[in-house]
Image: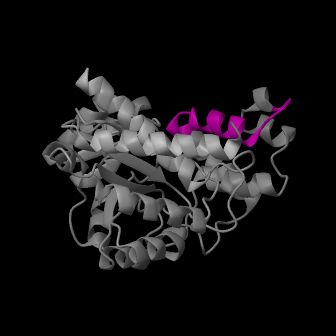
Amino acid sequence: MNRTAANLKQSVVARIQAQRARRSSASVGIALCYHRIDDPPGDPEQELVPALGSDRFAEQVEMLASRYEPVLASDLRDAAASRQPGQRIPVAITFDDDLPTHTRKAMPVLLRAGVPATFFVSGASLEAPFAFWWERLQRAWDRGLVDESWLRGVGLGSLAADPSIHAVAAAIEGLDPGERAHVAAELANLAGADGSDCGMRTADVRELVAAGFEIGFHTLRHDRLPDLDDDALAGALSDGREDLERAVGGPLRSVSYPHGKADGRTARAARAAGFDSGFTAGGRSVGEIDDPHLIDRGYPASGDVRGFDRHLAGKLWQVVGEASG
């Protein structure tokens, strides 16, 4: 069987799986996590947050709109629980981080398709440009400035022999907040001041709100929440929240955990902080939603839309089969 015939067969199987899942009574939902939408598409080998091309994103959005029921992130659990057999499976399209491409590239695609989405924002750049450490690392890396001497100077000498940008980023992510803040400052010195295009201003956030999109919280400092003690965790879920709510013009109902990391303690803290739902990013994307504060999301692949469709249908049928069994 040649590749074209094999792909056609897989697509037919995927369509059958999706239809069977739709006829089931399982309370399942789909949650997807996007970041940068831009052109040209990025390189996953050399970029920490590679861009998904706008044409590929448009194909994915159109497919989701035609076969699923797009909903806001804060409504996903209720939509999954209230879905009747035969009705479409709900899907939440979400975005993380404070990226100017949210309004410039993603928003026009979503508006043309009439599809809702939720943007999880930290609010760190509402008033002035600000780049997070991984954005500064990317700038420095692209300019060839991250060398053995610099790594040793910031305490990452163990990576000096054969570093990759992903290895360096993982090491920085694993530092405690104080050490990571120090490295972020050193990266600013290395890569230069954050440019005027860094982050999202209040006007950008309000543009998304005015267009009918939902804003959620992504925490001000983007620390990995399970690593924090109880007081620091409570602070991470509150610091900067009021400023972002003022920009939005209302309360933030959902939170997206930085780096997609959360555990039971994180979920309890998010519930205590007044969030209705919380989102991780472990890659599962499809599932029954047991805990509204631990809803997992998947990262959409950059391949063609047929592969994207087959992947979601296969995952959906796998979950529905497990629930039925």
Horizontal arrangement in the rendering, residue 267 relative to residue 316 (left or right): left
Residue at 72% from the left image edge and 52% from the top image edge? 43
Residue at 68% from the left image edge and 61% from the top image edge? 41
Q: Is residue 162 shown in magenta? A: yes
Residue 285 image point, x, y percent: 41, 40
**Does residue 120 appear in this view?**
no
Quadrant of residue 280 within the rendered picture? top left
Residue 231 image point, x, y percent: 31, 35
Q: Is residue 168 shown in magenta? A: yes
Q: Which residues are magenta?
A: 160-178
Residue at 55% from the left image edge and 41% from the top image edge? 9
Horizontal arrangement in the rendering, residue 321 relative to residue 223 (left or right): left
Horizontal arrangement in the rendering, residue 184 relative to residue 215 (left or right): right
Horizontal arrangement in the rendering, residue 187 relative to residue 143 (left or right): left
Residue 103 image point, x, y percent: 47, 74
Residue at 51% from the left image edge and 72% from the top image edge? 128
Q: Residue furthest top?
A: 325
- Of residues 30 and 168, the one drawn nearer to the viewer in this rendering: 30
**For residue 309, above or below residue 122:** above
Quarter of the image for the N terminus: give it.
Answer: top right
**Does residue 161 appear in this view?**
yes
